[in-house]
């Protein structure tokens, strides 16, 4: 059904360096088969999937899907034909319409016949495709969310909606690039079961890129292993997963023990969210806990439990309706929600890495590090205060601008646009660091994260997925924050690279005395790194324990995550 013969693909970087992403790759996939593709970050998995999709022109070889084929000499016309018979779900892809879940699917169904997704006539779409939309939502277990707007879905729910929209195209082959990356075990189980159901009921051929052995063992009939753009092995999921994991680093023998000093105090936090349709969606209430100096605390729970909302309130990015979030900095307690120099002093010691983070696409790594050090350094509060006075800004207004430096770039720009300003004002208040000082500051962080200093001059789009995650972490760590808030940022990483990052984080947090609060769904990562976990569900804390094995096992049972138990 799918035939790949001697496919090669090179990329040329801005400095003229050539990267061989694929080297003479050949394999076949039978109709209705689920083929797994494994490999470390940067091994060529996503490039291969994009070539199968028809969005990457290959340099040599040929690709055939059903009756549609392309080779290195094919025109765009034939690559467009390949797009029509395949559907793809790319990692960290959250491109959805600001409509309800059902309307997002109806748009794609309408476009299948009328070729215009942007100008959908919903009355026509409902009459012609309403039943099909309901059937697709049932397949991906989103029927109960059909009337909810896409913007308020959890990360895992967004991924299932993206998959539903792809199914609406009636593809011959479904290409999945880490489809369950950001999902909790409960949602991941639903996604994996949806893939099985799609494969069995619709007989759609599936090519599944995933670096997670549990996912491959649960879904794949057969797995190929990529390394540096070449197929180095092929076999059963058990055989290939074992080979893939054999060179993983050992867990570093470091015990990150918290001190007896409280540094974060969360008191009686309450927040309620509403949807324009569908009524109340989430109510966070009765949130009380303290975090000690050098604690590594994980927030665990199913998608939609309120973990990200709580973390954003810890970061002062969203305000609670009631309650306080207090930080102890320089022996003084400051409320992260009260504007002023106290909050700014706290924020200068705080690093936040978002779930849907994005590097500046065309900026070099060095440039982004220099900008980051301009935001977060030992003298930032005093120096920014002087600059603000020169242009007539109050301390409270300066602090409000400083808050934007911890938001995702698109969110910060949107808030500035709402008051008629652009992002240049942040550069004026917090100018970038000199390049030489930036190189010196990041050297040990790069070494700890197994990043080569050569990539400092690369632009973000020239990095692999795994490199992007580690570079983003380096951006946060380069200023040696006292507090580090992580919102599931490592879901993209293969377990081999993740072990390296976990070991690095343990070393760095120990060396610099960093207190970490993180949201994660990766149960092995939680157990390896944390020394305490809070279990959340439906906006409430239902367990708080330092017994990581017990609380994680309870979480897996709560999620009915059979794929983590090996029950295929």
Image: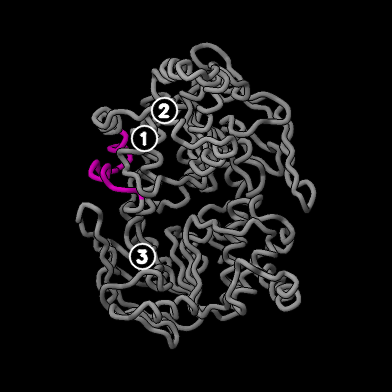
The residue tagged 3 is 47
Q: Sequence-wise, which precedes: disc 3 or disc 2?
A: 3
Instruction: Please identify the quadrant where the N terminus is shown.
Output: bottom left
Residue 244 falls within the magenta-colored stretch: no
Q: Which mark is residue 428?
A: 2
- Asked which quadrant contains residue 123, the reply is bottom right
Viewer-closest of 287 and 534: 287
Image vertical order of residue 114 relative to residue 309, above or below: below
Place of residue 524 in the rendered image (x, y in percent of width and height, measured from the top left): 48, 47
In the rendering, at what x and y percent does residue 180 appear? 53, 58
Q: Nearer the viewer, residue 203 or 392?
A: 392
Q: Residue at x 68, y 27 (%)?
A: 288
Residue named by callout 1: 253
Marks 1/2: CA–CA distance: 44 Å
User: Which segment did they paint magenta?
Assistant: 445-460
Residue 458 covered by magenta stretch = yes
**Numbered label attached to residue 567:** none
- Note whether 274 is above or below 511 in the view shown: below
Question: In the orientation shown, which residue stands out farthest toward the top?
Answer: 331
Q: Callout 3 environment at 10 Å: few (<14), some (14 to 19), or many (20+)?
A: some
Q: Residue at x 41, y 20 (%)?
A: 380
Q: How is the rendered protein coloured?
A: one colour
The relative height of residue 492 versus residue 325 in the rendered view (above or below) is below
CA separation in Å, label 1 and label 3: 36 Å
Image-based side of 124 in relation to 58, left or right: right
Residue displayed at 66% across by 42% down: 306
Q: Earlier in the sequence, mark 1 or mark 2?
A: 1
Query: Are there few (<14), some (14-19), or many (20+) residues within 10 Å of tag 1?
Result: few
Between tags 1 and 2, which lies in front? 2
């Amino acid at each position: 059904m799918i035939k790949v013969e001697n496919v090669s693909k090179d990329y040329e970087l801005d400095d003229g360096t050539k990267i061989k992403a694929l080297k003479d790759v050949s394999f076949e996939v039978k109709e209705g088969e689920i083929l797994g593709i494994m490999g470390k970050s940067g091994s060529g998995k996503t490039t291969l999937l994009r070539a199968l999709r028809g969005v990457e022109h290959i340099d040599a070889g040929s690709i055939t899907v059903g009756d549609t084929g392309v080779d290195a000499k094919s025109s765009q016309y034939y690559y467009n034909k390949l797009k029509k018979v395949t559907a793809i779900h790319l990692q960290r892809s959250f491109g959805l319409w600001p409509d309800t879940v059902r309307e997002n699917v109806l748009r794609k169904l309408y476009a299948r016949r009328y070729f215009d997704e942007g100008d959908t006539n919903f009355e026509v779409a409902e009459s012609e495709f309403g039943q099909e939309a309901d059937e697709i939502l049932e397949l991906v277990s989103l029927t109960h969310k059909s009337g909810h707007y896409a913007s308020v879905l959890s990360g895992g729910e967004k991924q299932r909606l993206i998959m539903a929209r792809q199914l609406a195209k009636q593809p011959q082959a479904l290409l999945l690039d880490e489809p369950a990356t950001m999902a909790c075990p409960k949602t991941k189980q639903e996604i994996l079961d949806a893939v099985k159901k799609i494969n069995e009921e619709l007989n759609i051929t599936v090519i599944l890129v995933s670096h997670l052995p549990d996912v491959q063992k649960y879904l794949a009939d057969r797995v190929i292993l990529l390394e540096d753009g070449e197929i180095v092995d092929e076999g059963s999921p058990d055989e290939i997963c074992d080979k893939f994991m054999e060179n993983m680093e050992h867990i570093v023998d470091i015990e990150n023990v918290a001190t007896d000093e409280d540094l974060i105090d969360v008191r009686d936090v309450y927040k309620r969210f509403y949807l324009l349709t569908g009524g109340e969606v989430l109510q966070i209430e009765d949130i009380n806990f303290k975090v000690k100096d050098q604690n590594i605390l994980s927030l665990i729970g199913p998608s939609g439990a309120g973990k990200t909302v709580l973390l954003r309130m810890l970061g002062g990015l969203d305000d609670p309706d009631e309650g306080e979030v207090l930080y102890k900095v320089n022996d003084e307690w400051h409320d992260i929600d009260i504007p002023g120099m106290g909050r700014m002093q706290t924020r200068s010691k705080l690093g936040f890495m978002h779930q849907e983070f994005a590097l500046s696409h065309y900026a070099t790594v060095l440039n982004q590090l220099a900008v980051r050090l301009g935001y977060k350094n030992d003298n930032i509060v005093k120096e920014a205060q002087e600059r603000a006075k020169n242009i007539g800004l109050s301390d409270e207004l300066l602090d409000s601008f400083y808050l934007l430096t911890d938001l995702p770039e698109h969110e910060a720009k949107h808030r500035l646009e709402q008051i008629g300003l652009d992002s240049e004002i942040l550069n004026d208040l917090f100018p970038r660091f000199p390049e030489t000082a930036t190189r010196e500051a990041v050297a040990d962080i790069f070494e700890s994260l197994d990043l080569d200093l050569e990539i400092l001059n690369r632009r973000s789009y020239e990095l692999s997925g795994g490199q992007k995650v580690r570079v983003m972490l380096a951006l946060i760590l380069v200023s040696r924050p006292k507090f580090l808030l992580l919102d599931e940022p490592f879901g993209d990483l293969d377990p081999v690279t993740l072990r390296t990052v976990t070991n690095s984080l343990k070393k760095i947090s120990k060396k610099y005395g960093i207190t970490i609060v993180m949201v994660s769904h990766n149960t092995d990562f939680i157990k390896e790194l944390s020394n305490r976990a809070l279990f959340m569900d439906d906006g409430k804390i239902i367990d708080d324990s330092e017994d990581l094995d017990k609380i994680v096992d309870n979480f897996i049972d709560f999620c009915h995550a059979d794929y983590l138990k090996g029950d295929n």
